[in-house]
Image (cartoon, helix red, strand yellow):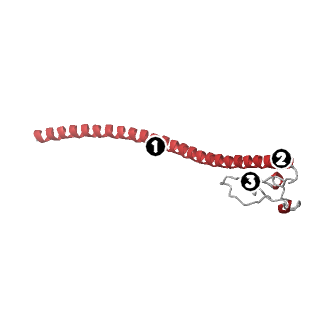
Amino acid sequence: MISTARVPADKPVRIAFSLDNASDDAPPEDAIPLVFPELEQHLQPLPPCHDSLESMEVFKQHCQIAEEYHEVKKEIALLEERKKELLAKLDQAEKEKLDAAQLAREFEALTEENRTLKLAQSQCVEQLEKLRIQYQKRQGSS
């Protein structure tokens, strides 16, 4: 008999097989149980003929393939999530790079403005000194 249960996508799927010939426990042929609920209907393993060992083996192989498929899909989902995270980090890094470039430009502009202001300040100090000397000369000559 094959029993089915819904299993969350993040849980591993384990399948047990019994090769005994208890045909009274066998489900009706038209009832196709969903061994892998998240697997598309056309990819579901078909129930085996319980009287045929070959059919049971094919079913077992199909279930193993379905389990591998489930694992690959889960890994793809994890990789896609990781890709999203990395793209977000890349976007953040590019934004920070642009911010750093903007800050560097602002720094250069402010450095140049500072140099210009220091030059103007030293010229004003010189001019003030000359004016003081002229004022003192006038005071002395009066």
> Left or right: 67 with respect to 28?
left
Q: CA distance from mark 1 to mark 2?
A: 66 Å
10 Å crowding of disc 2: few (<14), some (14-19), many (20+): some
Q: Earlier in the sequence, mark 1 or mark 3?
A: 3
The one of 70 and 24 positioned closer to us in this rendering:
24
In the image, what residue type sits under mark 1? Leu
Q: Find disc 3 in the rendering and name its residue.
A: 16
In the image, what residue type sits under mark 2? Val
Q: Earlier in the sequence, mark 3 or mark 2?
A: 3
**Could you say whether the residue bearing mark 1 is in a helix, strand or loop?**
helix
> Left or right: 40 with respect to 95?
right
The one of 108 and 140 positioned closer to us in this rendering:
108
Residue drawn at x 35%, y 37% is 115
Residue 49 percent coordinates (x, y): 87, 53
Q: Find disc 1 in the rendering and name its residue.
A: 103
- In the picture shown, does residue 20 fall above or below 119? below
Residue 133 percent coordinates (x, y): 17, 38
10 Å crowding of disc 3: few (<14), some (14-19), many (20+): few
Q: Find disc 2 in the rendering and name its residue.
A: 58
Q: CA distance from mark 1 to mark 3?
A: 64 Å
- In the picture shown, does residue 30 fall above or below 107? below
**Residue 36 lies in what quarter of the image?**
bottom right
